Image: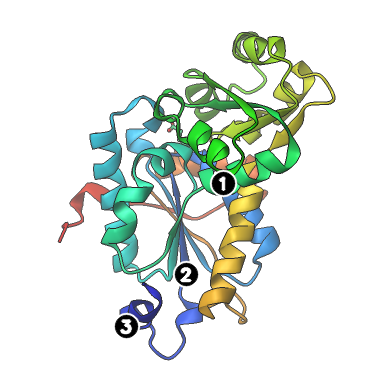
Amino acid sequence: MYSSSIFDTFSPQEPQRAPIGVFDSGVGGLTVLRQIYQQLPNESIIYVGDTARLPYGIRSQTEILQFVREILHWMQQQRVKMAIMACNTSSALALDIVRQEFNFPILGVILPGARAAVQQGQRIGVIATPATAQSNAYRQAILEIQSNVQVWQVSCPEFVPLIEQNRIHDPYTMEIAKTYLEPLIQKEIDTLVYGCTHYPLLSPILRSLLPQQVQLIDPAVHVAAACSQELDLLGIKNTHPPLPTRFAVSGCSQQFTQSSLQWLGYTPMVEQVCFADTVLS
Ligand code: DGL
């Protein structure tokens, strides 16, 4: 499908050297980036954070589609060889539609997360943004793979703003986390899926509130593995040393530099880009 067009798009001699585009509304996608660093250390990455328009999780499908198309169009201009939607909300509301519109492969986080969840448990809780929870994308994906499990989805509208404001250790965050997890604990879940890429950043808090036997599933781990497989399949895995990661955000670049430092362990160079300026063909 896309495997032939990929070679027409960029660096015809060495397509494996082209970067992978990774995007999220903000710092959540860094959980995916960290997994890519671990599992695919030779890949060059362009990371996009659409920080001027977050949170995505309270947006309509029309808005998400528009934002995702703009970002992917910009990534196309940067000649990426593959894109990863490091964002569950975009994966739930836009992936199936936009996948056909671009000539490079686009991976989402929901299917890899759902596959991992059914391998772990039978009583599966999913915490997600309001848009992802309402879309039912996780329930559908999980039940399509395994129909005899139970799935409960909880919408957690306050988490992303709290994480983006760096209020992870604020007592209020603990209180709100208790409220969100309570109905899932009542259902005696054995597995909890982070249905938003921001949420692994809350893992110390969530872990402390959950019974010990509950397994946590981070789809970031599994999308990085899926990406590795796809690169092998297409013969475009990079074997050369990677370029430094390029960071592009739509909001304040300094703010992103400051907030991402703790998750990356280094100070990123961040540029500001207006994705809405990209001309849609
Ligand atoms: N981190 C994204 C997700 O996985 C987006 C969160 C948001 O902006 O609401 O859904």
Of the residues tagged 2 and 3, which is closer to the observer?
3
- Disc tally is 3
Instruction: Tell me which numbered mark, 2 or 3, is placed earlier along the sequence.
Output: 3
Q: Amino acid at mark 1?
A: Leu
Q: Which residue is mark 1?
A: 30
Instruction: Tell me which numbered mark, 1 or 2, is placed earlier along the sequence.
Output: 2
Q: Amino acid at mark 2?
A: Pro
> Going by the image, does 183 lie left or right of 72?
right
Q: Secondary structure at mark 3?
A: helix
> Going by the image, does 65 lie left or right of 201?
left
> Going by the image, does 199 lie left or right of 134?
right
Residue 90, x across and y down, in percent: 39, 41
168 over 53 or under it: above or below = above
Image quadrant assignment for residue 254: top left
The disc label shown at residue 19, or none: 2
For the residue pair 117 and 256, the one nearer the viewer reads as 117
